[in-house]
Amino acid sequence: MKIYLVGGAVRDKLLQLPITDRDWVVVGGTKEILLKSKFQQVGKDFPVFLHPKTHEEYSLARRERKSGVGYTGFKFIFDKNVTLKEDLIRRDLTINAIAQDKKGNYIDPFQGKKDLKNCLLRHVSHSFVEDPLRVLRTARLAASLMHLGFQIVPETMMLMISMVKNKELLHLTSNRIWIETEKALKTLNPHVYFQVLHACHALYYIFPEISFLFEEKNFFSLNFFKNLYNNSILFMRLSKISILTEDIAVRFSYLCQFLCKDSVFFSIKKFYDKSAACLVKNLCNRLNIPSHIREIATLSAGFYIFLKNIYYQSSQDIVNFFLKIDAWRKPDRIDKLSLLTNFNYFYEKKNNSKKYFFLKKSFESIKNISIKLILSQGFKGLEIKNELNRIRVQKLQSWRKKIHVI
């Protein structure tokens, strides 16, 4: 029985990147041998075991055969006669099909090291097309390794396009889609993930709402829209905001805030855009996106028009906004929405520095108002809330006069 380190751990080791997870493949072993050695099997029918001490994953070398649809439609053959090469050939990309033995020697039957050197993402074999999840995984890896100059080879991109054309992606579950998307949003260049999905036409099936932004024909009659929502500009700005924050709620919300753009500039006094918020909420629900991300994305889209023009809103409406988003109990929402608002000001070249972080500073000017004085004056019930808000509006207005922003 021989054990090899495989997959991303070998790839990242060769690239001198941090190794977060180690996966191992066991050649010449059996389920009985591993269980006898106190390995814990994961699942009943899948040959993956957890090491008794390190809890790292050890998989029996296996062959696979397509037997159904989607990324789960496979039958596995795993016995001690399966070779290492047979196991490696079922993997997605050559750079993930490199193994290392216990002596440090590399086994590289598909020239993955050469592709690492040349910064290329290339499929191992034509069986790549049998698993639709590989479209998302390749897009995510392109985002992860973009800073090193990696690119997808044309042949692999053509396979991805053919998989999309054959509607293979329709078999992906919402859970798997979000898992890959979340990983992509955590990379240094999350915009690359969406770029690749757009390039292979997968964005239409995975994120139809976002794909709509890149259909120039939708705004043919409005040159301003064509300029603002050009996909290269959106990708560039997603790249820039990702430099400012690693918060994936902010990164994802940046894309979502434009999803109901047909009414964005028609009324600067619009308080809350229900249609935009509903669109984003439905998107998040469809993909089972975690609530802490869904909430920011929905608020960012619903209040996009209001926040875009926050500098010109009345103090009363600004206080109402704080109440609507539950800012006093969840002040982190102010930080996230303020970053998005400030970022939009910067890229629309509105150079008045007083507008930068105006939202956050407005909240800071009134967030610590105490209700003790109000209670001492005999206010009761709803009167307390009304008086507290009156004082907040008054104090915010005074602060705005002080900094000459009315």
Image (cartoon, rainbow, N blue to C red):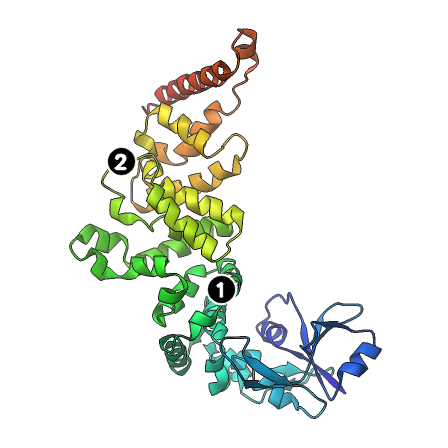
Residue, x 40% and y 78% (percent of image)? Answer: 163
- State whether residue 343 appears in this view: no
Residue, x 56% and y 78% (percent of image)? Answer: 96
Q: Residue 5 in the image: x percent, y percent?
A: 68, 78
- Foreground of the two, 205 or 54: 205
Specify the amino acid type for callout 2. Answer: Ile
Secondary structure of residue under mark 2: loop
Q: Earlier in the sequence, mark 2 or mark 1?
A: 1
* Residue 153 in the figure: left or right of residue 108: left
Q: Would you identify the image quadrant in which residue 36 lies? A: bottom right
| Residue 177 disc label | 1
Secondary structure of residue under mark 1: helix
The quarter in which the N terminus is drawn is bottom right
Q: Residue 305 in the image: x percent, y percent?
A: 32, 40
Q: Is residue 400 above or below residue 97?
A: above
Residue, x 47% and y 75% (percent of image)? Answer: 132
| Residue 268 disc label | 2
Instruction: For label 2, count other residues whose C-alpha is less than 10 Å away and answer few (under 14), some (14-19) or many (20+).
Output: some
The quarter in which the C terminus is drawn is top left
> Which of labels 2 and 1 is toward the front?
1
Q: Residue 64 in the image: x percent, y percent?
A: 59, 85
